[in-house]
Image: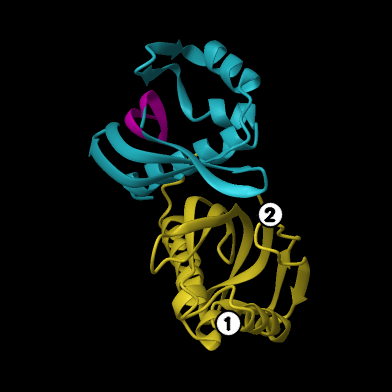
Amino acid sequence: VGVSSSNWRAAATLDVLDVLAQLARCCDFGTVDDYLELVAEHGTWDMPDNPQVGVAASRRVGRDAIRTGVEERRAAGFQGPGTNTLHVIGSVAVDVVAPTEARARSYWLYYARTATTPELRSVGQYDDRFVRTGEGWRLFHRRISVG
Amino acid sequence: MDDREAIRQLTARYNLAFDERDVDGWLACFTPDARVEFAGSGRIIEGHDQLRQVIETTDNTGRHTTTDFIIDVDGDRAVQRCHLTELGVDNGRAVVRRFGRYEDELRRDAGTWRFASRRLRYG
């Protein structure tokens, strides 16, 4: 558990933390385009079966495929504005492995019925890779585990 | 890295290492003479040997998350207070198993922050 004091690692850590938070917020409140702006063009999104909410496993490669996945989950009422759902991220550990590459592990909590009595529907972990592009840090690979 | 962010990162690594049974990673979060106290039960664990026994024998299937960090740094020492939420999946349902509050003392040696003591009170 080393802690680097170099400035670029510190700046990258804070940037990655911010992108993680923005991904969650855009998932819940933003547009699909807002969300996809945070994803690298050739990004990958891996999700296993989630019996807690009844969603089947899927693997999406590339921003267009990831867009399709987001639109499907919104259409099904699992996420997005008006669905009264929230993604909350916790225990975020960031490893900046190079000036343009970072990894982050975090826990996610998925709540439903947030407008009335919030119900914790599902929990799991994100294993993410981020890359730094000309537009800033972007999600390059998200591997989701459930439970 | 900013000291407060470094301590938040240490706390996240502590949670993840414990949940993943990463024994060495978890022990590396502590100073060699670290002490963990469970307020309420009076249980006290001191030093890496006792801590190793804890992580190797605890039947943990939960996920530990911490929030609401209040951190005060004074040179190479710091104190932190934060909330614990222990999550799990029971009978296929995501549940909050319990809450807790940490009161921590931290020490920086050779540029690395570690826990010198953690006091956990459930509830």
Q: CA distance from mark 2 to mark 1?
A: 21 Å
Q: Which residues are magenta?
A: B101-121
Say which residue label 1 marks.
A36
Chain with colour cyan in the figure: B
Residue A43 drawn above or below residue A50: below
Q: Is residue A1 visible?
A: no
- The residue depicted at 54 percent of the width and 83 percent of the height is A37
Whole-percent x, y for residue B98 in the image: 45, 36
Side of B99 where A53 appears, left or right:
right
Mark 2: secondary structure: strand
* Display colour for chain A: yellow
Side of B83 where A15 appears, left or right:
right
Amino acid on which the number 2 mark rests in the picture: Ser
Whole-percent x, y for residue A41 in the image: 66, 82
Amino acid on which the number 1 mark rests in the picture: Leu
Residue B15 drawn above or below residue A47: above
The question of residue B109 being in magenta is answered with yes
Chain identifier of the residue bearing label 2 in the image: A
Q: Nearer the viewer, residue A129 or A2?
A: A129
Is circle 2 on the same chain as circle 1? yes
Residue A16 drawn above or below residue B71: below
Whole-percent x, y for residue B89 in the image: 62, 44
Q: Nearer the viewer, residue A58 or B88?
A: B88
Q: Is residue A5 visible?
A: yes
Side of B82 where B20 appears, left or right:
right
